[in-house]
Amino acid sequence: MRLPSFVSTAIASAVLLCAAGAAQAEITTYTSQAAYLAAVGNTGVDTFDDLDLDEYIGPLDRAAGDYSYTVSGGENSDALWGATDDFSDFWLTGGHRLDVITFNLNNVNGAGGFFFGSDLFGSSTSSDYLILTATDSAGATVTYTLPTPELNSFVGFVSTGNLVSLTMAAEDQPGVWATVNDLHLSVSAVPEPSTYGMMLGGLGLLGYLARRKAQKS
């Protein structure tokens, strides 16, 4: 049976919308926690306060609210450390200062947190910069150099697709380990392009059924 032209048009529009959404996926960088939260939907936060001042062998399975992820160290060490200034607010750092720490993400559109440097003993310390890189499922990658990070330096990334990884590194800065606190993971604030496509397809089908019903009346 040949579909009516308006149904074919709706389906074609849905397909084109989905394809366009995938092709145009892009990542936006935020340096304000408030701006990041305004750009995303439901957000979970991993505070790391369940950690001790101790070594943990990665990769670690973690969760930020409803969203699970894994975190691992770099080429020099598979260890990760819980660290703190005051033994009440803990954060996460790597086992070797030259390591790139990688967060592997699942079904989220946003990722961010407070990024800064810590020293050999896990205490916060001054640093010149940190390198943060976000990658999404469409292959888009954004690298942001965070200058002179402090405890309250927030950086977040939001993709029009799904983010698959977030990395942090201090590179070769003597006495500085890349560190994160309060990792934020979020879903999109608006429906994904694929959701719009399904909506258009559903509307087309409903219109077709209504038209057939009217013709039989």
Image (tube, rainbow, N blue to C red):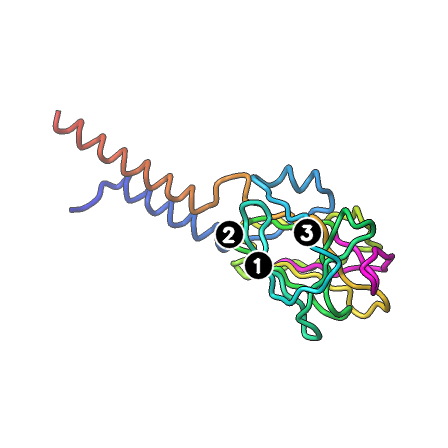
How crowded pointer 2 is (Cα within 10 Å; few <14, some 14-19, many 20+) is rated as some
Depth check, mark 2 against mark 3: the one in front is 3
The answer to which of 125 and 38 lies nearer the viewer is 125
- The residues colored magenta run 115-134
The residue type indicated by label 1 comes to Asp
Q: CA distance from mark 3 to mark 1?
A: 12 Å
| Image spot of residue 60 (x, y percent) | 60, 61
- Check disc 1 and report its element: helix, strand or loop: strand
Report the label total: 3
Q: Given the current orientation, which residue lies at the most extreme bottom position? A: 76
Q: Residue at x 77, y 47 (%)?
A: 88
Residue under numbered circle 1:
61
Q: CA distance from mark 2 to mark 3?
A: 21 Å
Residue under numbered circle 3:
48
Q: CA distance from mark 1 to mark 2?
A: 15 Å
- Check disc 3 and report its element: helix, strand or loop: loop
Q: Main secondary structure of the magenta part?
A: strand
Mark 1 / mark 2, whichever is N-terminal:
1
Residue 42 got which mark? none
Residue under numbered circle 2:
107
Q: Residue at x 84, y 67 (%)?
A: 173
| Image spot of residue 49 (x, y percent) | 70, 49
Q: Residue at x 18, y 46 (%)?
A: 2
| Vertical arrangement, residue 22 with respect to residue 65, above or below | below
| Vertical arrangement, residue 97 with respect to residue 41, above or below | below
Mark 2 / mark 3, whichever is N-terminal:
3
